Image (cartoon, grey):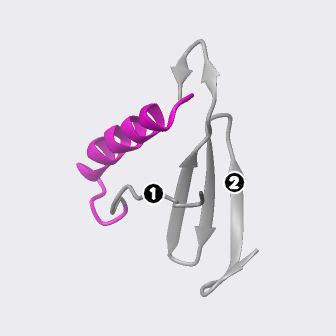
Amino acid sequence: MRSVHGKVERIETHASVVFLAGPRAYKLKRAVKYPFLDFSTLGLRRRALLNELRLNRRTAPHLYLEVASDNCR
């Protein structure tokens, strides 16, 4: 995969997919449900991302910029 910044690296976890594109990283929450987390709906995934943004901006505001919709539909 390529972007305007060159090669895009894809990193997968049990709950997310992260795309590293040059100086940027884009994180998508998977639509999954486990006993320890529930990202089964768009609303639950968005809430988790907003919480992650709020928490991580306290220590790294220059890294955590925004939560945006992917608009792939």
Of marks 2 and 1, the one in the foreground: 1
- Left or right: where 37 falls relative to 46: right
State which quarter of the image contains the N terminus: bottom right
- Residue lying at the far left in this picture: please name it: 58
Residue at image location 33% in from the left, 63% down from the top: 65
- Report the Cα–Cα distance between label 2 and label 1: 19 Å
Q: Is residue 62 above or below residue 16?
A: below
Secondary structure under the numbered disc 2 in the rendered image: strand
Residue nearer the viewer, 8 or 73? 73
Write down the quadrant of residue 67 in the picture.
bottom left
Residue type beneath disc 2:
Ile
Residue type beneath disc 1:
Ser
Q: Is residue 42 magenta?
A: yes
Q: Position of residue 2 (x, y in %)?
A: 72, 80
Q: Is residue 29 above or below residue 68?
A: above
- Residue lying at the far top in this picture: please name it: 35
Q: Is residue 48 magenta?
A: yes
Secondary structure under the numbered disc 1 in the rendered image: loop
Q: Position of residue 52 (x, y in %)?
A: 37, 42
State which quarter of the image contains the C terminus: bottom right
* Range shown magenta: 40-63
Q: Do labels 2 and 1 touch, CB within 8 Å?
A: no
- Residue lying at the far right in this picture: please name it: 1
Magenta: main secondary structure equals helix
Residue at image location 27% in from the left, 44% down from the top: 54
Other residues around mark 1 within 10 Å, as few (<14) / some (14–19) / many (≥20): few
Q: Position of residue 43 (x, y in %)?
A: 42, 35
Q: Is residue 53 above or below residue 62?
A: above
Q: Which residue is the site of mark 2?
A: 11
Residue at image location 63% in from the left, 29% down from the top: 32
Q: Which residue is the site of mark 1?
A: 69
Marks 2 and 1, the one that precedes in the sequence: 2
